[in-house]
Image (cartoon, helix red, strand yellow):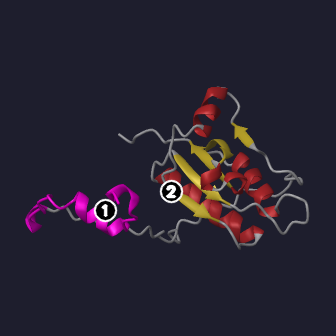
Amino acid sequence: MSHRNKLVPDADVFREAVKDVTPLKPCDRFTPAPKPVKVHQPFPPSPPIPDTLSDHGAGDCALDEFLRDGLNRMTLRKLRRGAWPPQDEIDLHGLNSDEARKLLEGFLHQATGRGLRCVMVIHGKGWRSEGREGILKVRTRHWLAQHAQVLAFCDAPANAGGGGAVRVLLKVAPPRA
């Protein structure tokens, strides 16, 4: 009976394959640093951020995409293709409309203050909306279109939330002299 006809457990095959390997000395080993845990800092209590976003005119259908007037359609295409990877994100799941609006406005204020170019806003798909699009999805996209610092937004890729999240391109403030 040849060796090929025998069923050999994977561990035995592995040991046979590495039997002549010389292990690294402990000081030559690289220990990867643990991935940092992302902690959102609470928004500073002052100065208060004005609540300028309105629910009026949101309708029942969510915008699939948005591009500020005067911008080239190529900007939206680049955003959709990931030319600007999201630098931060916020998850609005489980919040009521008022809480979500205030948190979103604070998040966008903080993101633009930090000079972020692209962020991800997760609002969910609204599966409990009985055949309609989720209220939070519709309103979040409506608020983003109203926000002066938002240049464009589009659905997130399928692996990052799809229609339950948006990639948002923000205006970058010019550097201060």
| Quadrant for the C terminus in the image | top left
Say which residue appears at 69% left-offset and 36% top-offset.
68
Query: Dot 1: what SS?
Result: helix
**In the rendered image, is residue 34 in sight?**
no
Nearer to us: label 2 or label 1: 1
Q: How far apart are marks 2 and 1 (CA)?
A: 45 Å
Quarter of image, res 64: top right
Q: State the residue in front, 117 or 129.
A: 129
Q: Is residue 45 above or below residue 76?
A: below
Magenta segment, which residues?
Answer: 1-28
Judge left or right: residue 49 versus residue 137: left
Where is residue 29 shown, x and y percent of the image? 16, 62
Compare marks 2 and 1 and give the one earlier in the sequence.
Answer: 1
Three-letter residue code for mark 1: Val
Mark 1 = which residue?
Answer: 13
Question: Residue 106 falls in which quadrant of the image?
Answer: bottom right
**Residue at the image position 58 percent from the left and 54 percent from the top:** 120
